[in-house]
Amino acid sequence: MSQQIMIVGLGQFGMSLSRTLSEKGAEVLAVDIQKNLVEEAATFVTEAVVIDATDEAELARLEPGKRDVTVCAIGDDSKEASIICTALLRQMGAPVVIARANDKMHQRILQLVGAHQIINPEQEFGKRFANRLLYRNVIADTNLGEDLHLTEICTQPSMVGKTLIELSLPKKFGVMVVGIRRNAKGKVIQPSPSEPLKADDNLIIVSNEAAIPKLIKGV
């Protein structure tokens, strides 16, 4: 059964999230107070409705307690609305409420009203993009929390022809190779410790952030 996800707020982040989740097979209910945004989302989501998400009665009619996940993606234009909406969603029994924060104060308030998870898309993108600027061999970087990162990097020239056993990456750099993307744009396969790496392989590693530059400079 497809996941049922409600997205409240259809700015750039909310709209992009709604589209991507829909493309991946989720049943998305998209919500916004602006009719033009709801009409745009209606072309690709399961359902789209125009409501004021700070109106308790209107929000309750959408039955957030029956959704697998609810994302309050209300943007910079209304912190107050995002706080009220998050509080109402928790009050109505939404099992997982993820709220978008714009700054540290906003984040603290969202925590106080009960958000299960808080995200700051601009901040997270800035951190990932900084790594891509500093380390040109980094292709993708995802924060897993508690300073743990899932990172995709190009195989370094000194790694080519060597096996993961020979490289001893966990011992030397504190990184664990969890996958290999063969031919750079191909499918991700499970790494074989005894198979030599190829020049067009990408390594998918789990490590703390500090290990990434050490790995790239040290091998």
Image: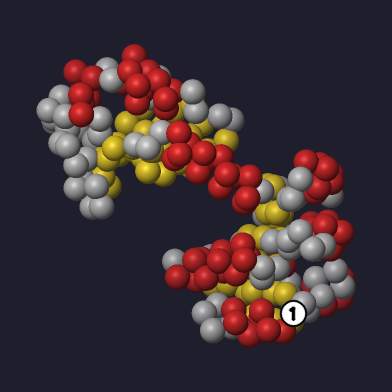
Relative vertical location of residue 179 with respect to residue 87 in this rendering, above or below = above
Residue 185 rendering spot, x and y as whole percentages: 25, 52
Q: How is the image coloured?
A: secondary structure
- Residue at point 37%, 43% (across, down): 139
Q: Is residue 91 visible?
A: no
Relative vertical location of residue 199 with respect to residue 93 in this rendering, above or below = above
Relative vertical location of residue 214 with respect to residue 55 in this rendering, above or below = above
Q: Label 1 crowding class (10 Å Cα cut-off): few <14, some 14-19, many 20+?
A: some
Relative vertical location of residue 115 with respect to residue 73 in this rendering, above or below = above
Residue wearing tag 1:
34
Residue 205: name its quadrant. Answer: top left
Q: Nearer the viewer, residue 199 or 30?
A: 199
Q: Is residue 90 visible?
A: yes
Q: Nearer the viewer, residue 208 or 11?
A: 11
Q: Secondary structure at mark 1?
A: loop
Number of marks present in the image shown = 1
- Residue at point 24%, 47% (across, down): 184
Q: Nearer the viewer, residue 1 or 142?
A: 142
Horizontal side, residue 15 vs residue 62: left or right: left
- Residue at point 34%, 36% (across, down): 137
Residue 75 rendering spot, x and y as whole percentages: 73, 61
Residue 211: name its quadrant. Answer: top left
Identify the residue at the far top of this view: 172
Residue 85 rendering spot, x and y as whole percentages: 81, 62
